[in-house]
Each structure stands twice: as structure tokens, then as C-alpha cells.
Image (spheres, grey):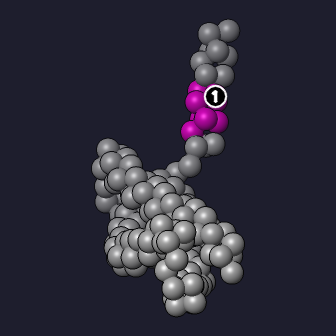
Amino acid sequence: MRLLTNILCLLSVLSLLSCSDTPSKQVSSMQKRLAVVQSGVSTLYERDFDFLVKEYYRIDTTLARKSNISKEMDLLASYLQQFETVRVDMLDEIKYSEQQLSDLKYDIDNNKLSENDISKYLKDEEAAVKRLEAQLDYFRDRFSQQKKVVKNLK
């Protein structure tokens, strides 16, 4: 009976371990998420940022900075400037994280790191990916709000 209990416990532990992602799979998942962020930043820049810049100049020249819209225009200009500055940093951080993840995956696959080191590096890269995702979400939200404002001013 005791042997059966030990076997069942061992099988339970093994099944739990097999369900969890391996470090290599975690790296692959983060690499995919980084690719989504990079694509999102590019799309935001090429589509939304470009649209909002054009609309800003159109509204600024046609409505001659009426006082009732000056706050909205100032806010829009602020978001556009902020994104232009942050976008470059985001792209640099994406490139850096891609390289880090590629190196980490190589080291994991070739058993060059201890479990503690793997865990630490995975945690660090997860934090970087989450930060990039949050920045992207922030600008998507702000640009979405500003597009509504701009469309109402037409």
C-alpha cells in the first residue's frame, strides 16, 4: 500500500512538472510576445501616429487655435511628442531583449546555466516584456482617445 502511495505521489509530481512550461518554451513565448509588441509599435507609428500628426496640422491651421480646442490640441501634441521620444527607446529595448532571449535560449538548450540563473534571467526578461507591453497599451489607449477627439473636431 505504501509503495502504491509513493508511486501515485511520484506520478502526480511528474504530471505537474510536465504541464508546466520548460524554460525554453517560456523564452519562445516571450520572443513571440516581443514580436507582437514590435509589430504593435510599428503599426501605431505608421498608422495612428501618422494620422494624428496630419490631423493635428490640419486642425491647427484650419481652426486657427480656437480657445475651446486649444487644450485638446496641446494634449494631442504632448502625446505625439511623448510617443516619438519613447518609441525609439522601446525599439532599442525590444532589440536588446530579443538578443538577450536568443542568448538565453541558446544557453538553456546547451545546459550552460544553473536553474537559479535561468530563473533569474527569465524573471528579468518577463519584466522587460511586460513593461514594453504596458507602454504599447498606454499609447494605444491614448491614441484611440485622441482619434475620437480629432474626428469630433472635423
Q: Is residue 30 magenta?
A: no
* Residue 66 coordinates in the image, percent (x, y): 52, 77
* Residue 138 coordinates in the image, percent (x, y): 51, 60
Quadrant (top left, top right, bottom left, bottom right) of the C terminus? bottom right
Amino acid type assigned to the residue bearing label 1 in the image: Ser
Tag 1 residue:
12
Query: Based on the displayed image, in which of its 4 quarters is residue 25 positioned?
Result: bottom right
Question: Can you say whether 143 is above or below 23 in the image?
Answer: below
At 58% from the left and 30% from the top, the residue drawn is 13
At 66% from the left and 22% from the top, the residue drawn is 8
Query: Based on the displayed image, in which of its 4 quarters is residue 2 positioned?
Result: top right
At 37% from the left and 63% from the top, the residue drawn is 104
* Residue 108 coordinates in the image, percent (x, y): 40, 60
Residues 83 and 18: in front is: 83
Quadrant (top left, top right, bottom left, bottom right) of the N terminus? top right
* Boundaries of the magenta span: 10-17
